[in-house]
Amino acid sequence: MDQLGIEKRLSLSYLFCIILGGIASITTGISWGHWYRTLDQCVGRNCSCILYGQNTVSRFLGGGQAPCIWVTFGPLLYVFFCICLTCFHGYRVLFTTKSPRMRSTRSVVAKTETGSSVQITAISQEDTSPLPRAFWITMSVFTSFFFAYALINFALFLDGFYTTCNQYRRVLEKMIGMHGSALPVIHRRLYCQSVFDFMDYMQLDSENASRNGFINTGLSLSLGLAASCFAWMILLFSSVLNITMAKRKHRYV
């Protein structure tokens, strides 16, 4: 694959990362902001996070604030990085440098009706202007770092999501009054989306705070999870492309 093809793929990859990172940040922020005051009922510490919720004897509490800060604002770091590179590679792809050494020529001799010969030369732009190997090595390091960064962000998000889901299953046991052989229905058959649906309508507000209406918490968090998952996959793909170019021997440096 030539450099132009690589840069086209990188431009699209970075663009998708911007979109996915924005979705992950916005959807998580909506859920966190909606439940912030309702779940923050701890004494002496902040437990407002929708992730890592805790079931206690008397009430359901949120998790520490740090995971929500990380999951909500963490993607913005690689979003900013991808914005810069989308502009860079996008500009190069759209406005390919008109360098003579990057052009291929093909000449064809054709005869006219009068019998004279005419030479037709076709000039095509094959590639973008070459970038030094140091650039590709640097980008390989950055994209590999952000791949690991996004993967950790997703892993924390996923763990916090399932922790809250499993903890709220215990709340449902008490609310619905299920026991005995009916318990596996809650713990094994009820999807987390349904658990969060129960939470949306059955979780009571605290004494000093109330929610402004209802949101689909399960859908919001699931969208954020999906976006976060695809983001690290695309960053991995971008890293592979940059490493491929870094390992390639360049003729023009």
Image: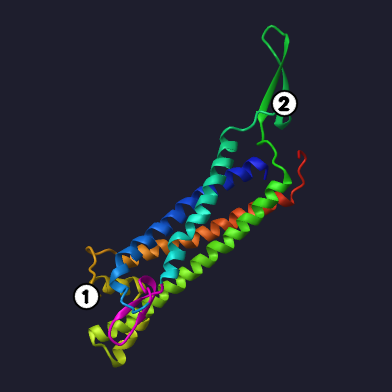
Residues at discs 2 and 1 in contact (Cβ within 8 Å): no
**Which quarter shows the C terminus?**
top right
Nearest the viewer among 12 and 77 is 77
**Secondary structure type for disc 2:** strand
What is the distance, in whole Å, between disc 2 and disc 1 at their CAs? 80 Å
Would you place residue 121 above or below residue 11 in this image?
A: above
Q: Is residue 140 magenta?
A: no
Specify the segment rendered in magenta.
45-64
Q: Is residue 167 left or right of residue 12?
A: left
Relative horizontal placement of residue 6, taking residue 162 as reference (left or right): right
The crowding category of the residue bearing disc 2, from other C-alpha atoms within 10 Å (few below 14, some 14 to 19, many at least 20), is few
| Amino acid type assigned to the residue bearing label 1 in the image | Glu
From what the image shows, is residue 182 above or below residue 66? Answer: below
Observer able to see residue 227: no
- Residue 76 x/y as whole percent: 48, 55
Given the current orientation, which residue lies at the most extreme top position?
114
Q: Which mark is residue 106?
A: 2
Q: Residue at x 54, y 56 (%)?
A: 234
- Indicate the quadrant where residue 22 lies: bottom left
Query: Helix, strand or loop at disc 1?
Result: loop
Residue 207 - label: 1
